[in-house]
């Protein structure tokens, strides 16, 4: 679990940055009951899964009961990051082949549970859009303070848009120098078209000037319609999300 720096090195500047993002999400929750949060990006490799895993961990550290749900039914990676078995998971629960209790994983981090993808289905979009999935999410909201859903890139498939329809908020990840601005705009538009509540965007893997003593930074940017909190996180570039 080397990629989960909030576990391996909780006192690092990057871990502090994640806690800053956590605080910002909490403030966005003052007037809304935001419990289900999905994390997506424009394409693969921008770091959304790593960010989700670290962010969920910081919430669990607040004595909140947290579940990480792998909603990427095409290319699941949550089980790899946490070094868990993916023999059964979300799809098996939805198909009623296994119970939630049989598939959910407890972790060494107190209050943090994980439900991996499970058997990769032939029809991911249909399964995610099913009534069973919506009912399942509603049950999770009764038992967890926060549910973080890892989704496929919205710029590649529609799955993230589907998941956003029953999520309370969405975090959008942008890999610095890894995606064209037009692709980012298209991805944001796709989320807005389904009514996604975009909590903010995270600029990931940006390069810090050698002359700068700052390792991380949070900043606000106001657009024509509303304010969105943007974040920057500096971390190692890697092929996996």
Image (spheres, rainbow, N blue to C red):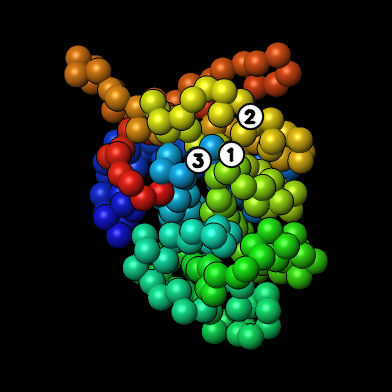
Q: Nearer the N terminus, badge 2 or badge 3?
A: 3
Name the residue rendered at 56%, 29% in the picture.
183
In this view of the protein, which residue sits in the foreground, 5 or 128? 128
Image quadrant of residue 220? top right
Tell me if 131 is positioned left or right of 102 in this view.
Answer: right
Say whether residue 229 is visible.
no
Q: Which mark is residue 155?
A: 1
| Cα–Cα gap, marks 1 and 3 | 6 Å
Q: Tag 1, which secondary structure? A: loop
**Mark 2 — residue?**
186
Identity of the residue furthest to the right in this view: 131
| Cα–Cα gap, marks 2 and 1 | 7 Å
Name the residue rendered at 68%, 79% in the picture.
95
Tell me if 108 is positioned left or right of 191 in this view.
Answer: left
Q: Quadrant of the N terminus?
A: bottom left
| Label pair 1/3, CB-CB below 8 angstroms | yes
Image quadrant of residue 204? top left
| Cα–Cα gap, marks 2 and 3 | 12 Å
Tell me if 72 is positioned left or right of 210 in this view.
Answer: right
């Amino acid at each position: 679990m080397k990629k989960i720096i909030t576990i391996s090195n909780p006192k690092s500047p990057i871990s502090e940055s994640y806690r800053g993002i956590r605080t910002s999400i909490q403030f966005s929750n003052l007037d809304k009951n935001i419990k289900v949060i999905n994390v997506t990006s424009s394409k693969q490799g921008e770091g959304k899964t790593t960010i989700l895993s670290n962010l969920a961990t910081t919430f669990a550290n607040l004595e909140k009961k947290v579940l990480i749900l792998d909603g990427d039914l095409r290319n699941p990676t949550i089980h790899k990051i946490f070094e868990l078995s993916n023999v059964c998971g979300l799809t098996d629960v939805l198909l009623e082949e296994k119970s939630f209790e049989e598939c959910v994983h407890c972790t060494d981090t107190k209050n943090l549970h994980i439900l991996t993808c499970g058997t990769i289905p032939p029809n991911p979009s249909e399964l995610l859009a099913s009534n069973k999935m919506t009912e399942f999410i509603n049950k999770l909201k009764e038992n967890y303070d926060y549910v973080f859903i890892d989704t496929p890139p919205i710029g590649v498939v529609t799955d993230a848009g589907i998941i956003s329809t029953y999520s309370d908020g969405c975090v959008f990840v942008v890999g610095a120098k890894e995606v064209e601005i037009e692709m980012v705009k298209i991805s944001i538009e796709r989320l807005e078209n389904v009514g996604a509540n975009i909590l903010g965007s995270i600029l990931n893997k940006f390069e810090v000037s050698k002359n700068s003593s700052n390792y991380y930074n949070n900043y606000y940017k106001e657009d024509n319609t509303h304010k969105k909190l943007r974040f920057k996180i500096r971390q190692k570039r890697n092929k996996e999300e």
